[in-house]
Image: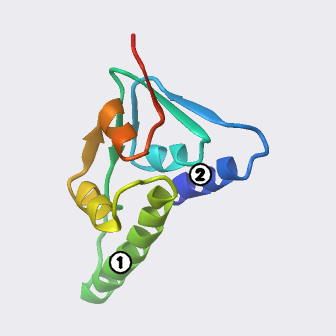
Amino acid sequence: LFDGIALKNYLKNCPENITILVKDIVASAGSVMTMGANTIKMYSDSELMINNPWTFTAGDAVQLRKLAGDLEKAQTSLEEAYLTRFSATRNKLKTLLDEETWLSPIQAIQYNLADQEIKI
């Protein structure tokens, strides 16, 4: 997640006009990074996947409660990253993230998470 956010922020601050072409699947932190582009193009048979942050863990109850809190903070960072482009409400974004949503180019464009579909 945080590498995806770092790359998004890097792309947002590049002086060049950045275009990302989604050729197949861009998922999870990859889709976060994609939000840094000025223009996002997707082939008609490609997909963009968005989901909540998650992790593997082990530990006692104290450690697991702390991890849950850390994931909630990461969730906020994730939402802010998508909201730089997302055109619907935060609640709609949360629903899509909760459902681990795979978006077609048309769906991604509807939410302003992509700009153009490239027909093949």
Q: From the image, state whether disc 2 or disc 1 is nearer to you.
A: 2
Q: Which residue is drawn at 45% across and 45% down?
A: 31
Q: Quadrant of residue 53?
A: bottom left
Q: Residue at x 28, y 67 (%)?
A: 91
Q: How crowded is mark 1: few (under 14 residues within 10 Å), some or many (20 or more)?
A: some
Extreme residue in the bottom direction: 62
Q: Which residue is drawn at 26% across and 55% down?
A: 96
Mark 1 element type: helix
Residue underneath mark 2? 8
In the picture, measured across the screen, residue 92 lies left or right of residue 29, that is: left
Residue underneath mark 1? 67
Q: Which residue is drawn at 36% across and 31% down?
A: 105
Q: Is residue 98 above or below residue 117?
A: below
Q: Nearer the viewer, residue 97 or 90?
A: 90
Q: Earlier in the sequence, mark 2 or mark 1?
A: 2
The figure's colour scheme reads rainbow
